[in-house]
Image (cartoon, grey):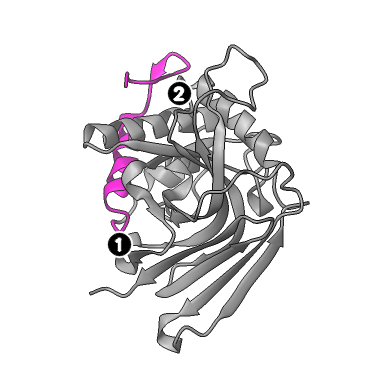
Amino acid sequence: MPQPVLVGITMDQQLIEELWKLQIDPSREASSILVETNISADEGQWIQLEMLSRWLNEGEELGGWKIGMTSGDSRDALGKGIRPFGFVLRNRLFQSGAHIPRATLHNGGVENELCFFMGENADFEKDANKQACKIVSCAAGFEINQKRLPVGCAPGIRVADNLSNWGIVAGDRVEPPRNLKQLTVTLKKYPIVENDREIEIASVKSEGHIDDHYQSLEILNDRLAEFGQKLEPGQWVITGAYGKHPFEEARFEGAFDLGLGNVEVTLTPTQ
């Protein structure tokens, strides 16, 4: 991937290096430059792609994308209608029932999100000349978010840090419903130390909470094209959070109605 350029100047290499160090080791002490620097969402997007390039140089593969700032309090956090993207590495795509060691994740949380799977020939294009991909199926899902940045960072730095993404967990694939406005998602946990006693964390409805999922996919398609990227067959895409909960050693379950089913992930104690 070529070195990105921002408004005619090369990106701040010190900022890039500090962000990359946190990608590799999120437990390290973050540099003050991350709080002191203010960049735009577009500048952050280019830096994020530099992070992706470095992961690819390390032998990782791109597995999919997220579209950010679509739901809840984060909606329009960068300005009205601004929807940045984030990338997801292929080795961090998990099937429902996955067990992930809690200690490997540092700080962060789990968020229920709807996951879409890309195939050939887009059916959500606005322009027939665009090389997008068709939604072949979707599933109940979790986004695993890792908080690497110190408090007080500018929104553009959050974009550069890949919108906190660490990975995705997805349930069984089903045909995408035509209308997702009536979708309700319930998040539960079963604490390991409490013998799997069910605790309901949140039950959230789509309407009034989250952008239209199919419009979000269109926006993601357009936004990726602006930065020389595109959706590819086989990629996973997530479109915004419903219920969320900080990391803890527990089994988490997301129940999605409209026939979408359930998804589970367990954060296990350190062995």
Which residue is at a point 34% across and 68% down the rendered structure image? Answer: 102
Which residue is at a point 40% across and 69% down the rendered structure image? Answer: 266
* Spot occupied by residue 81 in the image (x, y as percentages of width and height): 69, 34
Q: Is residue 184 above or below residue 247?
A: above
Which residue is at a point 43% across and 56% down the rendered structure image? Answer: 147
> Which label was assigned to residue 40?
none
Residue 8 on the magenta segment: yes
Q: Secondary structure at mark 1?
A: helix
Q: Nearer the viewer, residue 103 or 252?
A: 252
Q: Secondary structure at mark 2?
A: loop
Residue 82 on the magenta segment: no
- Estimate how packed mark 2 is, as few (under 14), some (14 to 19) or many (20 or more) residues with alpha carbons within 10 Å: few
Q: Is residue 39 above or below residue 102?
A: above
| Region in magenta | 1-28
> Which label was assigned to residue 229?
2
Identity, as a three-letter code, of the amino acid under mark 1: Thr
> Which residue position holds label 1?
104
Q: Is residue 205 above or below residue 189?
A: above
Query: Dividing the picture into quarters, in which one does residue 46 lie?
Result: top left
* Spot occupied by residue 59 in the image (x, y as percentages of width and height): 22, 36
- Estimate how packed mark 1 is, as few (under 14), some (14 to 19) or many (20 or more) residues with alpha carbons within 10 Å: few
Identity, as a three-letter code, of the amino acid under mark 2: Gln
Mark 1 or mark 2: whose residue is earlier in sequence: 1
Which residue is at a point 64% across and 27% down the rendered structure image? Answer: 124
Q: CA distance from mark 1 to mark 2?
A: 30 Å
Q: Is residue 264 above or below residue 138?
A: below
